Amino acid sequence: MAGTSKYHARKITTPEGTFDSRKEYRRWTELCILQRGGVISDLRRQVAYTLIPEQREPDITGPRGGVKRGKLMERPVDYVADFVYQKDGQTVVEDSKGVRTKDYIIKRKLMLWVHGIRILET
């Protein structure tokens, strides 16, 4: 079936951008209303947090003093939050979840461990 993901979520394109599911888009519209009403502020979408930085071999200094970056051994591991906003002076990181995959659960735990942020799941 074209246009659907493994978990049957369909991307939706709107004037505000592309969303991974109708559920995510509905939550976006709710958060926009809350922001217009002054309940939340600084609403952002698709905010990336690095959980494990990239890993490289040591840099190499050339004979003329130039530095060549070491070879990339492992790419970074990032978590991309659906929504981030301020509420009552606190930063809220929110994810619209349909299915909690193993990858997501590990990233959720790393967010708490590395950044001290508990993800709000809607």
Image (cartoon, rainbow, N blue to C red):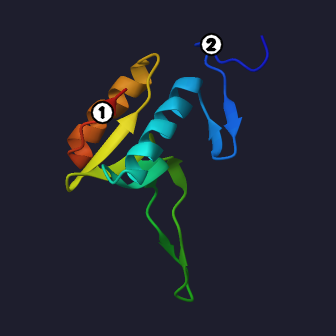
Q: What is the three-letter code of the residue carrying label 1?
A: Leu
Whether residue 52 is visible to the viewer of this picture, yes or no, is no
Q: Which residue corresponds to mark 1?
A: 120
Q: Which residue corresponds to mark 2?
A: 8
Question: Which quadrant would residue 2 be assigned to in this image?
Answer: top right
Residue 79 placed where, x, y %?
A: 43, 41
| Residue sticking out furthest to the bottom | 64
Residue under the point 47% across and 18% down = 98
Left or right, 6 with reference to 50 = right
Residue under the point 29% across and 45% down = 92
CA gap between label 2 and label 1 equals 22 Å
Q: What is the three-letter code of the residue carrying label 2?
A: His
Quadrant for the N terminus, please: top right
Residue under the point 41% across and 18% down = 100
Q: Secondary structure at mark 1?
A: strand
Q: How many marks?
A: 2
Q: Nearer the viewer, residue 9 or 43?
A: 43
